[in-house]
Image (cartoon, helix red, strand yellow):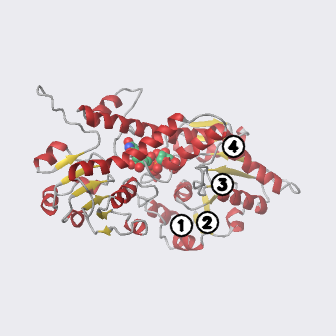
């Protein structure tokens, strides 16, 4: 059993802390937000993440997981201090490191025993060195025995616990191999490949992975747009591509594009790093541009179907940036809603989990209790997030409730033939119709 302190109880910190406790370690999670910590002590989760509440409750009960706002208490006797604080986008797309700095300074000021500082926050390449410098400078009078290890996280919201417990790989970067080896032991029971690199390489692996996944999505969306014009079906195209082992099937789902708290911020930050260091991130710029356009295309489709959208009631199903989360940060759904409002549409919307988080962002939107309430009297329904419950909708009932039965399936969940048979006008993403006489 090792003693860990996890700084930051956002989605990364909380999942990391709870899972390491579950693996048998003694973990104290620290946050500077007293309300958040008080709620966590009452087992109230700050985020919706399947399985999180149970794993936190079990480990709090067993005494292995504690929450505090007190750095001294959290760091006392800790062999490992994980930094898992937010790194929001700054003015020019750069990662804002103020919270990482605060965490590093607190460790420098309060720790008086050997410690490993592990960076889990997504930070620009070179930040590990910067954190080490901060600690070294602040402790110039009384040097602290420490090493910095970069341990990027690859968890996805909605499946974070499972991703932590069954990782494809663990990446550890450090200038001291022994230090990385000690962190590797924390993961040894997970039986996955552990890649040990230098600090900067580990930091780059994180950005390169997220940016590559975003690139795949923008790529498939670009092909989807061609499919619409050329009469091909992107679902089959993606299947045909994905069966090639060199390509693989994951992250080839065409739709409204990528959003969330990670991809937009990380692609922007990587492009910013590139420019800062004199290289041209041409591909990343195109990846971001395609993603922006993908959201606008929904509005073009609706305009094509309905003419002016002014005063038209339009329903939107799904608000979170992806299913199984209540996270609405940089959600494609929210941008689509704003674009529709800019065209004068009257928007109604529903999400299974994100209604509370969305309320303040969706001024003038009628927030409904379920999908059927959204469908009532609207001229079109836009499916923006791929929640399972939308796949089970009674489409006949939806058809009867709508004023004009137009479906814009922004995540390709419905079978075009089936919904057309039910009387809908259907627009998917990249689902072209072959109108050749021989077809
Ligand atoms: C992403 C990465 O997948 C994680 O590995 C990483 O740890 C995390 O960012 C992070 O940096 O913290 P996440 O943002 O939770 O995880 O969500 P994803 O499942 O990657 O989806 C991102 C966006 O891409 C969503 O808006 C989703 O709807 C969209 N997407 C995903 C598609 O449009 N098509 C796809 O085929 C897959």
Per the model, the C-alpha gap separating discs 4 and 2 is: 25 Å
Per the model, the C-alpha gap separating discs 3 and 4 is: 12 Å
Position of 273 relative to 21 (above/below): above
Q: Nearer the viewer, mark 2 or mark 3?
A: 3
- Residue under numbered circle 2: 31
Which of the 4 image quadrants contains residue 224? top left
SS for tag 4? Answer: loop
- Mark 2 or mark 1, earlier in chain: 2
Q: Which mark is residue 60?
A: 1
Q: Which mark is residue 97?
A: 3
Question: Where residue 26 sits: x, y (%)?
Answer: 61, 59
Query: From the image, which quarter does the C terminus lie in?
Result: top left
Question: Where residue 244 sits: x, y (%)?
Answer: 36, 26
Q: Is residue 256 visible?
A: no
Ligand 1 contact, mark 4 (Cβ < 8 Å): no
- Residue under numbered circle 4: 126
Q: Residue at x 51, y 42 (%)?
A: 210
- Mark 4 or mark 1, earlier in chain: 1
Position of 154 relative to 374 (above/below): above
Q: Residue at x 40, y 39 (%)?
A: 251
SS for tag 2? Answer: loop
- Mark 2 or mark 3, earlier in chain: 2
Which of the 4 image quadrants contains residue 240? top left
Q: Nearer the viewer, mark 4 or mark 1?
A: 4
- Mark 4 or mark 2, earlier in chain: 2
């Amino acid at each position: 059993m090792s003693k860990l302190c996890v700084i930051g109880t956002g989605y990364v910190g909380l999942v990391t802390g709870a899972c390491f406790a579950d693996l048998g370690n003694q973990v104290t999670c620290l946050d500077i937000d007293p309300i958040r910590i008080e709620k966590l002590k009452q087992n109230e989760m700050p985020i919706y993440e399947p399985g999180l509440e149970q794993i936190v409750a079990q480990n709090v009960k067993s005494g292995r997981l504690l929450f505090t706002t007190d750095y001294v208490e959290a760091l006392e006797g800790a062999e490992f201090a994980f930094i898992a604080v937010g790194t929001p986008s700054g003015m020019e797309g750069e990662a804002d490191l103020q919270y990482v700095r605060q965490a590093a300074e607190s460790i420098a000021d309060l720790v008086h025993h050997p410690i490993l500082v592990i960076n889990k926050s997504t930070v620009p390449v070179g930040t590990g060195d910067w954190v080490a410098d901060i600690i070294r400078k602040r402790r110039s009078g009384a040097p602290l025995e420490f090493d910095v290890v970069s341990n990027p996280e690859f968890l996805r919201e909605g499946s974070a616990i499972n991703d932590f417990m069954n990782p494809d790989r663990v990446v550890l970067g450090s200038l001291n191999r022994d230090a990385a080896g000690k962190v590797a032991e924390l993961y040894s029971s997970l039986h996955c490949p552990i890649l040990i690199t230098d600090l900067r390489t580990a930091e780059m692996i994180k950005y390169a992975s997220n940016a590559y996944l975003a690139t795949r999505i923008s790529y498939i969306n670009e092909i989807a747009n061609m499919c619409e014009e050329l009469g091909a079906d992107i679902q089959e195209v993606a299947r045909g591509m994905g069966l090639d082992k060199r390509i693989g099937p994951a992250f080839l789902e065409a739709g409204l594009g990528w959003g969330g708290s990670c991809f937009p911020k990380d692609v922007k930050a990587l492009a910013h790093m590139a420019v800062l260091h004199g290289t041209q991130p041409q591909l990343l710029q195109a990846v971001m541009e395609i993603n922006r356009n993908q959201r606008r295309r929904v509005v073009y489709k609706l305009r094509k179907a309905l003419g002016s959208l002014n005063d038209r009631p339009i329903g939107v199903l799904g608000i979170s940036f992806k299913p199984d989360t209540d996270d609405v940060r940089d959600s494609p759904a929210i941008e689509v809603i704003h674009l529709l409002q800019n065209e004068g549409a009257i928007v109604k919307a529903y999400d299974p989990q994100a209604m509370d988080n969305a309320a303040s962002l969706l001024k003038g939107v009628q927030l409904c209790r379920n999908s059927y309430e959204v469908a009532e009297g609207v001229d079109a329904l836009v499916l923006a997030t791929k929640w399972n419950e939308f796949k089970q909708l009674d489409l006949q009932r939806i058809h009867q409730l709508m004023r004009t039965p137009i479906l814009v399936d922004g995540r390709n969940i419905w079978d075009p033939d089936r919904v057309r048979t039910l009387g809908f006008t259907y627009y998917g993403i990249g689902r072209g119709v072959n109108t050749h006489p021989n077809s």
